[in-house]
Amino acid sequence: MQRPRKHRAPRAAEVDPLADLAAAQAAAELQARAPGWLVMWRRWGRVYSAWECRDPREVRIIERPDLAALHQEMRLVDIELRQIPRPSTQAPAAQPTPVDVAALWRDLPA
């Protein structure tokens, strides 16, 4: 039986600060083009992460090591969400309380 691999931190030789900076900038640019999404570069995991945040009850999270693959998956989620009927966010109209006007007239002092 194999033991599960532990996630390890990248070695200093594997980390390129300029590449991380470029990846973070690319994530910020994608986020600017994708309303409703939070996109960031996860330096520790060496992946791009995207959160679809339009409905806080149903956040979709996607992680891909490649920005193009992440963007494609984001588009697929957007298409899927457009096809799902959403419940109305408007509160139902308040119903007026019925008033017995005749009883009000009877209770007035003469």
Image: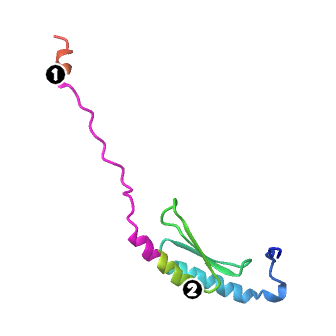
Which label was assigned to residue 69? 2
In the image, 22 versus 55, the foreground residue is 55
Up/down of 68 relative to 31, above or below: below
**Range of residues picked out in magenta:** 78-101
The amino acid type of the residue labelled 1 equals: Ala
The amino acid type of the residue labelled 2 equals: Ala
Say what secondary structure mark 2 lies in: helix
What residue is pinned by disc 1?
A: 102
Q: Residue at x 26, y 37 (%)?
A: 96
Q: Which quarter of the rendering shows the C terminus? A: top left
Q: Residue at x 23, y 28 (%)?
A: 99
- Estimate the x, y position of residue 78 in percent, counting from the top left: 45, 75
| Label 1 neighbour load within 10 Å: few <14, some 14-19, many 20+ | few
Say what secondary structure mark 1 lies in: helix
Q: Is residue 67 left or right of residue 94?
A: right
Q: Is residue 68 left or right of residue 15?
A: left
Up/down of 91 relative to 100, above or below: below
Q: In this view, does 88 lie to the left or right of 110?
A: right
Q: Which residue is drawn at 51% across and 84% down?
A: 72
- Which is the main secondary structure of the residues drawn in magenta? loop
- Estimate the x, y position of residue 94 in percent, counting from the top left: 31, 42
Magenta-colored stretch includes residue 90: yes
Please tell me how many numbered marks the rendered image carries.
Answer: 2
- Estimate the x, y position of residue 89 in percent, counting from the top left: 39, 56
Q: Can residue 34 be seen in this view?
A: no
Res 21 → quadrant: bottom right
Q: Which residue is drawn at 27% across and 33% down?
A: 97
Measured Cα–Cα span from mark 2 to mark 1: 71 Å
In the image, 5 versus 3, the foreground residue is 3
| Label 2 neighbour load within 10 Å: few <14, some 14-19, many 20+ | few
